[in-house]
Image: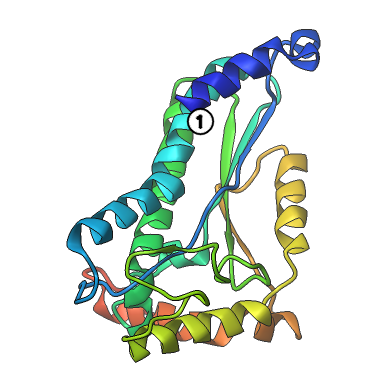
Amino acid sequence: GSVYAFVAALQAHPLFQQHGRVDILVNNSGRFVLGQIVPSPPTDFSFYLAQRDLGIRTLYSGHVMMTNVMLPLMPQQGYARIIFTVSIASYVTGGTFPFESFFDTYTSGKFALRVYANNLDAVLRAGGSNIRISTLNPYAMNTALAQHPHPIYTQPVNGTGLSDTDPAFNQAITALREALANGLPPSMVGEGCSQLLRMTAPEQNVVIASPREPFATQGGNALMKQQLLAENQISAVPFECGG
């Protein structure tokens, strides 16, 4: 597979041969996966399944593969860090927000990635490894992820990435694109990554957001707070604030 070819090329590189190890691995790849949760004509069911599978391989399985082939190249003692760019979406199911059903594959993949990262961190710590693992969970960021043709679509779209037959899909995707167009500066993700890499005992999970304006509005803080509180109400183990 391509990950093995990458590792072979890395090991042959003069810088790796001089250094002898990989101290930092940042898993940052991802794409939106967009479409109706229940396919309807003219969506072909096999296409729907294949696109959802591609989404999970992009958002989750690819990170797992890359991490596992890189782990043997990382020092078990001394400084070593792995960081995953996940998403605040990993903390919501979408069951309280209608538009989220159009992003359920994306949300599922991000949730699975955060669970993997946290469990891998626990296993490595228990085994005495000094590799520390963290996840970055950005709020709405000003990126082109939702702009056509970047997303993975699970239903037919036209040349602008919209549907000719599904107004609900168009409404959801347009709202997403508008939110990201006014989102947080992507440099905040780099700053968060840099802070974690400088920490002796990095946090396992951090958000990329701010309560200060204009960042609170750009990141969609009010919407995320509303959704997280609503999610708590449908949880099997809801948290309650006591007096």
Around disc 1, counting alpha carbons within 10 Å, would you say few (fewer than 14), some (14 to 19), or many (20 or more)? some
- Left or right: residue 218 versus residue 163 is right
Callout 1 amino acid? Thr
Q: Nearer the viewer, residue 240 or 95?
A: 95
Q: Nearer the viewer, residue 60 or 152?
A: 152
Across and down, in percent, residue 88 comes to 51, 66
Across and down, in percent, residue 140 comes to 60, 73
State which quarter of the image contains the N terminus.
Answer: top left
**Residue 81 visible within the image:** yes
Picture quarter containing residue 227?
bottom left
Q: How many marks?
A: 1
Residue 139 drawn above or below residue 123: below
Residue 13 drawn above or below residue 131: above
- Left or right: residue 25 versus residue 224 is right
Q: Which residue is mark 1?
A: 67
Give the residue displayed 70% in from the left and 46% down from the top.
196
Across and down, in percent, residue 128 comes to 51, 20
Give the residue displayed 59% in from the left and 34% down from the top.
132
Picture quarter containing residue 80?
top right
- Left or right: residue 187 versus residue 105 is right
Q: Nearer the viewer, residue 194 or 184?
A: 184
